Amino acid sequence: MKLKKQSTGHFNLILFFIICISILFTACGKTEAVFNEEEENKITATAGEMYKKEPEIKTAKIAVTGDIMVHSYQYEEAYDSTTGTYDFMHNFTDVQKYFEAADYAIGNFETVTAGEDVGISDYPCFNTPDSFLDSLKYSGIDFVTTANNHCMDKGTDGLLRTIEMLDQYGFDHTGTYASQEERDTVFIKDINGIKFAFLSYTYGTNGIPVKNSYNVNLMDRELIKSDIEKAKALNPDFIVVLPHMGNEYETYVRDVFVDWADYMFECGADIILASHPHVLQPMEVRELTKDDGTTRNGYIIYSLGNFISSQTTPPRNAGIIVNLDFEKVDNNPAEITRVSFIPIWTQFRNAQDVNHFMVRSVYEMITLPESERYNVVRPKDYNRLIDIHYETTGMYFDEEIPIENIQDQYVFWER
């Protein structure tokens, strides 16, 4: 990001102005004033106005998507029997541009990479090939939350190897940890001069015991409160909490999860990015009252749906990418300035009715020229895309947007 600087010409003009005034005063001696007081004040004011510093404006854009899962249909399609390797690189070629347009991209990594020696597997205990991380890195995802109900699917060893592989591939992450020290360290990310603290928790681990309490952040009120207080002490501009909570496949939010969100906001969270339902749920912008009595806008989404999975039955094959825009002017508190979203769809089979997983923009698929449409999607998938458009816009706006007014990206809220 480039910051505006006072131009050299601007400064030289002011300097010339001051020198001229000094010469005039010196030449005329102490007893004779060249300008009266009113004229001097005008000159001083003009010079001050010319030298007025432009504000320093910092901006950041974060892209957020939903659940990242790898079922057997996906890894079987990616498998090359001639080389014995898995290639997932095509999964995200269509949506890579949305993450590249952001400064930072976030997703929920709802699987483990425990190593092929323990067996690649899907539900109920996932284990994904390491090469999936190549495609995820290619997509532009920067950060993943790892505290979810599948993080212990291959036990403590699987959890630790997943952390090791995420580190090896250069992903930022939080929610599961290899040590107490790591767990007690709040993850802070400076994005273009705006600081974000990230905290992550899960409601449970599908009944699989957690060997060490520090390995997984479980949703506990005292723990959340303590962690948020610890984050506050680091003076971030925003505290982001990523809870894995909600009821699967429900498109509405139950009161118990609203209560959890209220509690997180009361403790000091500014942004809540929840996951687990695997379908879209509501989002909202709230006015929050901070510890010093000031107010600011906060944001919550209860579920972004699936980003990629083999859960291809409606409504589980729909999701969104949310863009959050932030701004900080000089030393004033940073603010959310815009919330927008991009409807997406996971394509299971291509137009030739062969398994081929790709995350697609709903807009791009619906607006394909008729001459190309059915070379890319099956007729029944095109009909599903129409339904996704109406379901998604109907959820986030007061009324459905007519298909002739479809957009690639919708503004949910703007300051």
Image (cartoon, rainbow, N blue to C red):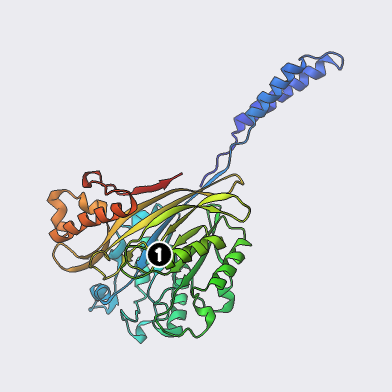
Q: Position of residue 152 (x, y in %)?
A: 42, 81
The reply to whether residue 94 is visible in this rendering is no
Residue closer to the observer: 206 or 109: 206
Q: Amino acid at mark 1?
A: Gly
Residue 36 position (above or below residue 295) = above
Residue placed at 59% from the left, 69% from the top? 226
Residue placed at 70% from the left, 21% from the top? 43
Residue 178 position (above or below residue 258) = below
Q: Which residue is mark 1?
A: 107
Residue closer to the observer: 321 or 60: 321
Q: Residue farthest to the right? A: 31
Q: In the figure, is residue 386 to the left or right of 136?
A: left
Residue closer to the observer: 150 or 9: 150
The reply to whether residue 173 is visible in this rendering is yes
- Secondary-structure class at tag 1: strand
Residue 246 position (above or below residue 321) = below
Residue 113, quarter of picture = bottom left
